[in-house]
Image: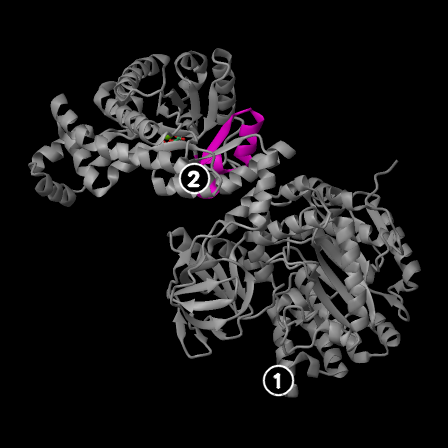
Amino acid sequence: MTQKYVYFFGNGQAEGRAEMKNLLGGKGANLAEMTSIGLPVPPGFTITTEVCTEFYKNNQTYPESLTSAVAENLKMVEALMDRRFGDPRNPLLVSVRSGARASMPGMMDTILNLGLNDTTVQGIIAQSGDERFAFDAYRRFVQMYSDVVMGMEKDILEHLLEQKKEQRGVHLDTDLTAADWKELVGSFKLKIKEELGKDFPEDPHEQLWGAIGAVFGSWMNQRAITYRKLNNIPADWGTAVNVQSMVFGNMGDDCATGVAFTRDPSTGENYFFGEFLVNAQGEDVVAGIRTPQPINRVKDKDGKLPSMEEVLPECYRQLVDIRGILEKHYKDMQDIEFTIEKGKLFMLQTRNGKRTAPAAIKIAVDMEKEGLIDEKEAVLRVQPSQLDQLLHPSLDPAAEKQVIAKGLPASPGAVSGQVVFSADEAEAEAKLGKKVILVRIETSPEDIHGMHASQGILTARGGMTSHAAVVARGMGKCCVAGCGDIKVSYAGESFVARNGVVVKKGDTITLDGSCGEVMLGAVPTVAPVLTGDFAQLMSWVDTYRKLKVRANADTPHDSRVARQFGAEGIGLCRTEHMFFEAERISAVREMILSEELEGREKALAKILPMQKGDFIGIFREMKGLPVTIRLLDPPLHEFLPQEEKDLEELSKTMKVPVGTLKHKVESLHEFNPMLGHRGCRLGITYPEIYDMQVRAIMEAACELVKNEGFSIVPEIMIPLIATARELQVLKQNAVAICNEVIARYDVRLEYLIGTMIELPRAALTADEIAVEAEFFSFGTNDLTQTTFGLSRDDAGKFLPFYVDNGILAEDPFVSLDQNGVGQLVKMAAERGRATRRDIKLGICGEHGGDPSSVIFCHKIGLDYVSCSPFRVPIARLAAAHAALS
Ligand code: PEP
Ligand code: MG
């Protein structure tokens, strides 16, 4: 049997189904599905993604049977439409669109009105009775086709159009007549011949194959490649091509075209949200050239533009019914495109709508309440990485702000940054570590890299479904779109607000994507409140996940934040962070500078009460939840200044000769401090440091137990262990101090002594180490560094290049290298458990907050992950996803 390359849909019957996205692309699969459930879809066919893959595999040639399959399907469309492709009297026109497995908005090219030429245009005049419409459609086709298929510079024909308007003394396209359009078609074609040295194809079949080739070709264009890279879409998925009979939204005032979401994609509110344009074709709504009208008045109560409900009430009612059918069928919020031709409604697309994080949560929780989905499905509907958006600040309501303009609240969040006017500039400035806001008249897919590099996006033109709005929401970036209050001058690198304020490149502004305000300067922000639907979802998350989630926190304040985010303990308290506070650092330096044990002990005695105070604060905040405290880890030189002038200052405050200080700094110098005198190696050589820290931890715990009836099991963690013997020595010392403190306070207190697994040798000998260790915490930052032989501090110079060029799929410091470092973790966990069955296993490297790493930790059976407080909800959700899928 020959392989099936083309799938038909039309008149209530379809060969494809919604589940066939991999083969038919999202658009093709859903056109088939909508057709089967009886929605009005213009007939057409889908050429599969396999053809695209084979096209690239076989040197850009098509499979043999494709030509005849396309011809057969075209015949079926002709039969249903009762029109013929290329027929001078009654021609069929088609659209040709791309459609990959994952939606890639605006990334690939679309051609409308295909099949028009000098003879078929007469047939369109006969069909429509409207010469102006027919020639307008024709010139649009010539413009699109010459750009997308033939590679003609868009602006050249656009310029001819502008000239024509000038010559006729009009401003709007709509003021041009049939004769004008007809003339323009002629001059367009001449210009194309002049520029490209070839004729515009007249043969509709040649046009069709040209368009199919262009769609497949667009899979490898730069914007598609960039989009795939940003969204982790593999290149070998390929795109499908959808060929569909045209319906026209621009045949008069009983025609329209629009896009809608079955619920609000910004907030998730359950009302029908959309925009449309009367007498417009296809991309006019998304292109942002005309300001679209709302489909109803639910939100836009006193807007000036008439709604679809008002001007096309019949079609609106039908669309509302379809909204209900689609939500019941797909059980998810849909993003739809429709066209109305002479009062008749057609559906051109449906897909699961992209949404902001707040919307994702609200929709999931609402749909569970409405009985459309269950709790588990609701949990799976929200992507862990999306939560990041929610956990970010919004504008401080008490802050003063100078609002200079207002646009559409296209994508929520509040951000400040320096204004730039081009995507390249945005990228360049962001690389220098600047926070920038990209300001454009409107954005196009060419701007995607700049949008990615920016904090937020501000556009002067375009609606809620404009390119800027859709892409920003997908990226979780703050965006204010369609801000007609500003006039942007690219040449002048500035914009003027309506009130006359001029904002130049480099000036700082603030955007509030939740209300559309643009403010001068940087307005302070506040942390998010996580109640309501968020709390509901997270309660489901907590019922389904198995993995516990702790936080990395070093202060009572961070501990409180962590608990508010749902942390079930502290997985890593880095004690060295406490050493840097103003009054402590001098005692720490005094300790480092002391050549004799006595001097060091004197200095340590000053630090002990402060550390104890910190631990009391943290234990109190954590209310009996487990707290893992790590003993001193970094090399000592980190606590001394390195610059000459800072050393001089220190010499004055410490009353130590500057020469002594310099000598000490020199003596502490190491070529590879990360592999040097740090971690447990400090504890071995200066036992008094760890002794002091253990005493501070135990005294803090004993005091709370004795005086306040707390129940605490402190977990004392020793970093950078390479051999079991190191741990044995250090544990012996620690146990002696613990027992001494417990006896002194005369309380009952259990405690655990464990280690970090941060070195390959520790992982390899985990069975020996577990003889001493009561818990392992995988320090995957160092373990990645030491397994890859990749310096954490220097990798920034070349790692991005590795990732950009596909040498590494991801930065291994961000997402755990599961095949390498992950295997060490897995093996050490197994070996640890083989020695000590109930050993507690967790991870506290940055990977503890990375969703795919969390899922890996679940799979290999760790007990918990620990991450920064703001990532705790992300880790909880990822853990639930791991348990449910
Ligand atoms: C680690 O190495 O993964 C770790 C958590 O420790 P630090 O980042 O402090 O070296
Ligand atoms: Mg470490």
Identify the residue shown where x is 67% and y is 54%: 353
| Mark 2 beta carbon near ligand 1 (under 8 Å) | no
Q: Position of residue 802 (x, y in %)?
A: 47, 38
Disc 1 residue crowd, few under 14, some 14–19, many 20+, Cα 10 Å: few
Q: Which residue is mark 1?
A: 166
> Disc 2 residue type?
Ser
**Where ligand 1 lies, by image quadrant?**
top left
Magenta segment, principal secondary structure?
helix
**Vertical position of residue 804 compared to residue 144: above or below:** above
> Where 431 falls versus 439 (above or below)?
above
Q: Which residues are magenta?
A: 846-871
- Name the colour scheme: one colour
Is 544 displayed left or right of 854 in the figure?
right
Check residue 865 for magenta coloring: yes
Q: Which residue was labeled with disc 2?
A: 868
Q: Is residue 812 left or right of residue 173?
A: left
Task: Quadrant for the C terminus, please.
Answer: top right
Name the residue located 52 percent from the left edge and 31 percent from the top edge. Answer: 548
Q: Is mark 1 within 8 Å of ligand 1?
A: no
Residue 26 in percent (x, y) is at: 72, 49
Q: Is residue 95 visible?
A: no
The kind of secondary structure element at disc 2 is loop
Report the Cα–Cα distance between label 2 and label 1. Answer: 61 Å
Tell me if residue 327 is in the magenta stretch: no
Mark 2 residue crowding within 10 angstroms, few (<14) / some (14–19) / many (20+): many
Residue at horizontal 33 percent and vertical 37 percent from the top: 617
Q: Nearer the viewer, residue 844 or 187?
A: 844
Q: Is residue 704 visible?
A: yes
- Secondary structure under tag 1 reads helix
Q: Quadrant of residue 687?
A: top left
**Three-letter code for the amino acid on which mark 1 is drawn:** Glu
- Identify the mark at residue 85; answer none if there is no mark: none
